[in-house]
Image (cartoon, rainbow, N blue to C red):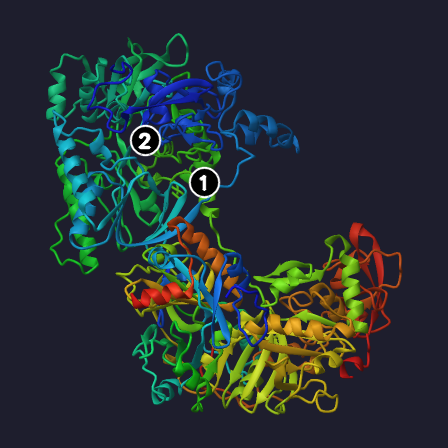
Amino acid sequence: MKVLICPLNGPRNISEFIYGGEYHPNPDHIEASSREWAEYVFFHRNVAGIVTEWWCHSASSYWFLAERNTLTDEILRTFNTDEIFNCRVEFSSRSNSEVPSG
Amino acid sequence: MADKTRLPQPLGMLIDRKQPITFSFENKTYSGYAGDTVASALAASNQWLLSRSFKYHRPRGVLTMAGQDANSMVQLHSDPNALADRVEITPDLEVMAQNYTGSLSRDRGARLGLLAKFLPVAFYYKAFFKPRGMWEKWAPLIRKKAGLGQINQNYQPEYFDKQYQFYDVAVIGAGPAGLCAALAAADAGAAVLLVDENAQLGGSLNYARSDLEGTQSRQMREALVARVEANVNIVAMTDATCNGWFADNWLPVIRAKRLYKVRAKQTIMCVGAIEQPAVFHNNDLPGVLLSSAALRLINLYAVRPGQSAVVLTGNNDGYTAVLDLVDAGVDVKLIVDLRDAPAYDAIAEHVCGLGIPVKIGHAVYAAQPDATGLHLGSVDVREIVSRGHCATRGEIIACDTLCMSVGYTPTYQLICQAGGQLSYDDDSAMFTLNQCPDNYYIAGSVNSLWTLEAVVADAERAAIIATNALGMSSRQIPDLIVDVQPQSPNFSWPIFAHPKGKEFVDFDEDLQIADIINATRDGYEHIQLVKRYSTCGMGPSQGRHSALTTARLVADATQRTVAQTGVTTARPPFSAEHLAHSAGRSFYPARRSNMHHRHLESGAQMLQAGAWYRPAFYGDAAARTQCINREVDNVRNNVGLVDVSTLGGIEVRGADAGEFLNRFYTFNFLKQPVGKARYALLTNEAGVIIDDGVACRFGEHHYYVTATTGGVDRVYQSMLKWNAQWRLDIDITNVTSAYAGVNIAGPRAREVLSKLVTDIDMSAVAFPYMCIREGSVAGIPARLIRVGFVGELGFEVHVPQYAGEALWDALIEAGQGQSIKPFGIEAQRVLRLEKGHIIIGQDTDAMSNPAELQMGWAVSKLKAFFVGSRTLKELGKIPLKRCLVGFVVDDPNAPIPLESHLVVDGDKMVGRVTSCNFSPTLKKPIGLAYVPPTHADAGSSFTIKSSGGSLVVAQVVDLPFYDAGNLRQEL
Amino acid sequence: MSVVISPTQTLRRSQLYRRHRQLGADFAQFGDSIAVDHYGDDEVSQARVLGLADLSTLPRIGFKGLGTPVWADSCGVKQPAQPNWATLQGDNTLVARLSSNELLLASNLTGSSKLIETLATATRAHRVYALPRGDSHSWLSLCGEQAANTLAKVCAIDFRAQYFTNLQIAQTSLAKINAVIVRTDIGDNLNYAIFSDSCSLEYLWDSLLDAMSEYRGRAIGLQALRDCATL
């Protein structure tokens, strides 16, 4: 059983966590072409190397991010979401470029 | 009176001669002592035959005395395949041998051995491959012949459980290396777990001497064990098996009926090495055993291994064994040394001076049974002329015991599981281990070190690295330890093919040299394929005694090195474990609403939905349909009460609450008035419907959103994940368990509820459909939501969880005059289906989008964004592939279709039924089904392939089935 | 008081009420609630070995939101500096900090806490949200020298006294359900407050009693805990 370090709760068995998929910035939901959008929603890149992933500590419902090497299954670091998401995201009906989202 | 079957004290350190115990084997009574294993007690009574082999039913007996081999498998009452050299005898224990027809000593199945030539490797694959059906016919017979023990089908479950344990350092194996490593780590302040599968700490120190007198091992054991036992930092577990290695040093340790889940910060594997058998004709006869097995019998159990012995050795350890045999009064007839130029150590030099004949450069070419055919009678000793080949003539030596000492394999299983690499050194003819993961070390003979000095130094070195890593010490790490032993203990080729075969490579599966060679000739050259094709290493001992020989044979047959050939993957478990260890004390969470006991008292038939217990219906299980129909009728005609506490509840509060719901759900919520409820449909980014509920706006900045029973946890997590990105000014809290709830529904619902409400105007004008109120019901603070739910006038009442039962009681009492009756989720399903309401997960699947479900009305086209908006826009550009429609079956004689029955068009599947029930209200079957868009209009008909293949014609109708104008719920 | 108490809203009883009665409980009343006073004799020595008490009807409340720390401070709440630690107020009200912006408050063993009463009705500042912890969560107390060994059978966290400090918090999985576990020793007796899903209380109670049986653990009443506090 792997150990994952939750930024709030410390080291825990990975069975206490829920995997939330890979983080990657999403394309502009208005400007993106159909193909770009379809790839964003349906395609998994399956990177052999370091990826950033969403994880949630179930008992505290705490979401955070982890950098993991998919070749070695080594977790390089875990960190709070505000490292990436540090301001309120707005959606206009025209475009939402320049905002990170996953 | 001294027991003549046993050697004198101090031999027999594991047995207590003051506690005799009688038990039975094959229905015959035997005696032994407390501490004896079945095998040692039987051996003391000169019963060496324990069981028959798997394939040819050959007689088998003691091989290792270490619980490492399948030869010692016996049948206990409810424990098949128990290891006779591991199971301790207890009073009146009943032991039977395994794998024989007739009797153990006259096994009719042994005739199979005569056919061995005609049963080559992969015989079954080849012989029964064609014609089809052949295998099914023969399998039961073959399985009966080639089985292991019997499962007791009347087994009564026993209390097995699990416990977590936490240590700074786990040391696996308590031989000299393990004891020293544990002490060194504990002395640095580490909390240490020391695990050994044997009954007593000490490992080889218990039975193997390292000096001529045998005092060094004994004194060292006594000193180390005393220090370990006195050390408060060490927990020592004997009779405990570390049965695997999992990520981050997660170690399952099994002892008795408990599985310990051990988490260690550092692990030191001191698991030792496993002595290997030589391979020659009839090397499986009882009486042929490893030297270490003989030493264990003598020293641990005071059992003489035999009367006259030959020692076959390829190293100096065989000479050491001679000392013990001689001391035990065994007549050692001959030492057969495979080496042509042995490098003797001091003990071997000494033994050579004892007057026992020694033949250098010779081998045991074959063993022959005695007159009974069940035990060793003599060995055929011949000169080695070239690697693996002997002279054409040899000398026959009569003996009842042959001790084999030809080399070792490190106990690599737990190390390879952790990612350690096994390589083979041609000079030492030995597997070696390297590249262990972080926080994981090996020490001692598993690390190919053999002298006690080197083993101790290696263990202390590992402990220093471990405690340095823990920050408990900052000591200089010693240089890599190098052994001073003059010669490798492994003889490079103790394998001698015989024209008659029966030179067993794998005792478990009765595989001979030719079987392995033939597997490579059949094209299975990779070691993993050799294993699967020949079954070598697949038996209970998992290749412990066959992996080295197999690697050597395959390497030789395929012109590769042994290192290139390697061994097969070692997976957990290391040794056989009871399924009960995995199954014991598993946890199955159960959630109960505050009204749970009232349901039971009202005769509810409960079912579990996820973790929740819910009433399916009330009444006799045998009268299920009548009960459900009565409940439906009562809701439609009077008033019913259903427990909806399981329904999810989420509070969304804060300045951006409306904005959040607008982004999260498909509908528009910004303009939703305070005091109103609105249907909320949830899609994911792929536009697929994943949940639904009702959003109740209790304040400008306060929404209370319901979610499905099974979906609320996912919905809540999804909300938190999105807002971790959007950073809106809100708080989201899952309050599902904080509220108990009921839905009171039926034309007389208001009449009943009004009796208990004083602070809310309950009139239809003041409290219309899809409105919400806060007040009190029977004095309990409550949230009231006027929803359609089952298509009648109805109110959902949510109260603090603790008051659920009080609310239930009050409503039941208040409704007596109105014929109030509880209803369960079966009636609820029928009622909701009559209204055409979908059930997420039943009527939807991983592809369902709102347009297919004709729920476009629940999706706002005006919003800038919601989670599934872009994908739904894309889907809108392409034609619909299917539609969910309501249907009825008008033919009263047609079987009622069931969910998942196919919608067919000729011989093509074109859709499926998702829900179907007999409607007591409409008096005919109604349902929902996915059909092609061409068949989606009311009045169309389609065909359902129902139970038994019968075809049922269904008519598409407009939804809802019942009360099309929705007048009843808006009364 | 061992009369049958009906589930009226004026007298709050635990989801375990029927189990308590089967065990022969005598109940005591606290404000508008009842809790088990004792089941039998000499529960103090039981509490010192291994006891399980149901405190689910005692008051508690939670607050969450960005404004919570400052607001609670202004209301006189002594807060732990770090998440996953707890403090005891002057009247022994437990204040558990579950994240930087979330507090859980639980009353003392008398079943009354002025602080909780005050906060429940106090005007809340911007971005302070009340949480119905008394309704959403049950509250069990597992105490005695074998408490950590018992938890080791249902939870993958090391609760042994030398590794899990008094007033330390673990939010974790207990017998496969989520729980907040706070070590709050009573007197010198090891004690773990377990806050978990109120609807799973019967399941958790049964699971813990099963795990405790090996160490001869039993259900105990509130009186024994109080006696431990004053001994």
Co-location on one chain, circles 1 and 2: yes
Q: Is residue B455 left or right of residue B400?
A: left
**Label 1 is placed on what type of residue?**
His
x 56%, y 84%: residue? B703
Residue B66's spot in the image, x, y percent? 32, 31
Q: Earlier in the sequence, mark 1 or mark 2?
A: 2
Q: Nearer the viewer, residue B773 or B779?
A: B779
User: In this view of the protein, can residue B94 be seen by the observer?
Assistant: yes
Decide: few, some or many residues near mark 1? Use Cα within 10 Å; few <14, some 14-19, many ≥20: few
Looking at the picture, how far across and down is residue A28, in whole percent?
A: 51, 83
> Residue tagged by mark 1?
B578
**Residue B115 in the image: above or below residue C7:** above
In this rendered view, identify the residue nearer to me: B578 or C187.
Answer: C187
Q: CA distance from mark 1 to mark 2?
A: 19 Å
Q: Looking at the picture, which amino acid does disc 2 mark?
A: Ala
Q: Secondary structure at mark 1?
A: loop
Q: Please state if C43 lies on the left or on the right of B474 as rendered.
A: right
Which image quarter: residue B634? bottom right
Residue A89 location (% of width, % of height):
47, 86
Numbered mark located on residue B501 in the image: none
Check disc 2 and report the residue beneath it.
B66
Rate crowding at label 2 as few (under 14), some (14 to 19) or many (20 or more) other CA atoms within 10 Å.
Answer: some
Q: Quadrant of residue B925?
A: bottom right
